[in-house]
C-alpha cells in the first residue's frame, strides 16, 4: 500500500496565510475600533470566560446547590446578552439602525436592565 504525503510547502503556505490574516484582523481592530467598544469587548470576553469556568466547575466538581449555579450562570449569560445589546447600540457602524435611541439612553437602559437581572440572580442565590 502506497502512503502519500502532503507536501510540507502547502501546509506552510496555509499556516502563513492564516497568521497573516489574523495579524491583519488584529491591526485593523486596534486601528478602527473605539476605546469604549474595546472596553465592552473586554467585558464580553470576561463574561465568556466566567461562564465557561462556572459550567466546568458544575460538570467537574459539584452542582450543589443547583439553584446557586442557575442564578450565577443565568446572570452571566444575561449580562452577556445585555452587554452585547449595548455594544450593538453604541457601535459607530450600527448607529443608523438605532436612530431613535441616543447612546446615553442605551446606557441607561442597560443599567436598568442589569439591576433587574441582578435582582433575579439574588432571588435564585437565596
Image: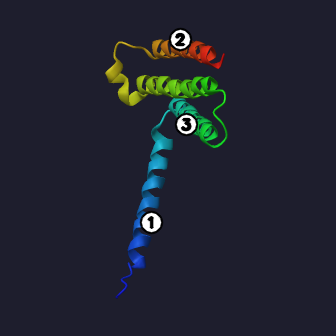
Can you give x and y, in whole percent of width and height, for residue 16 in the image? 45, 65
**Mark 3 = which residue?**
48
Q: What is the C-alpha distance between the residues marked 2 and 1? A: 46 Å
**Which corner quadrant of the image does residue 11 belong to?**
bottom left
**SS category of the residue bearing label 1:** helix
**SS category of the residue bearing label 3:** helix
Task: Please tell me whether mark 2 or mark 1 is closer to you in this view.
Answer: 2
Q: What is the C-alpha distance between the residues marked 1 and 3? A: 27 Å
What residue lies at 36% left-to-right and 27% top-to-bottom?
A: 94
Q: Residue furthest bottom?
A: 1
Tell me the tag on residue 15.
1
Tell me the tag on residue 112.
2
Reading the chain from its start, which is encountered first: label 2 or label 3? 3
Query: Height in image: 31 above or below 47?
Result: below
Image quadrant where one finds the N terminus:
bottom left
What residue lies at 42% left-to-right and 14% top-to-bottom?
A: 102
Reading the chain from its start, which is encountered first: label 1 or label 3? 1
**Count of numbered badges drawn on the protein:** 3
CA neighbours of label 1 inside 10 A, class few (<14), some (14 to 19), many (20+): few
Left or right of 10: which side holds 78?
Answer: right
Can you give x and y, in whole percent of width and height, for residue 19 in the image? 47, 60
Reading the chain from its start, which is encountered first: label 2 or label 1? 1
Query: Height in image: 49 above or below 103?
Result: below
**SS category of the residue bearing label 2:** helix
Pointers 2 and 1 in contact (C-beta within 8 Å): no
Q: What is the C-alpha distance between the residues marked 2 and 3? A: 22 Å
Amino acid at each position: 500500500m502506497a502512503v502519500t504525503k502532503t507536501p510540507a510547502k502547502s501546509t506552510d503556505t496555509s499556516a502563513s496565510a492564516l497568521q497573516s490574516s489574523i495579524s491583519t484582523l488584529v491591526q485593523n481592530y486596534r486601528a478602527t475600533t473605539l476605546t469604549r467598544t474595546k472596553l465592552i469587548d473586554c467585558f464580553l470576553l470576561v463574561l465568556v470566560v466566567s461562564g465557561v469556568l462556572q459550567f466546568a466547575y458544575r460538570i467537574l466538581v459539584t452542582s450543589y446547590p443547583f439553584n446557586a449555579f442557575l442564578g450565577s450562570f443565568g446572570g452571566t449569560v444575561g449580562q452577556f446578552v445585555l452587554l452585547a445589546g449595548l455594544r450593538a447600540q453604541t457601535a459607530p457602524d450600527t448607529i443608523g439602525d438605532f436612530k431613535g435611541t441616543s447612546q446615553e439612553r442605551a446606557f441607561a437602559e442597560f443599567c436598568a436592565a442589569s439591576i433587574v437581572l441582578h435582582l433575579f440572580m439574588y432571588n435564585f442565590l437565596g
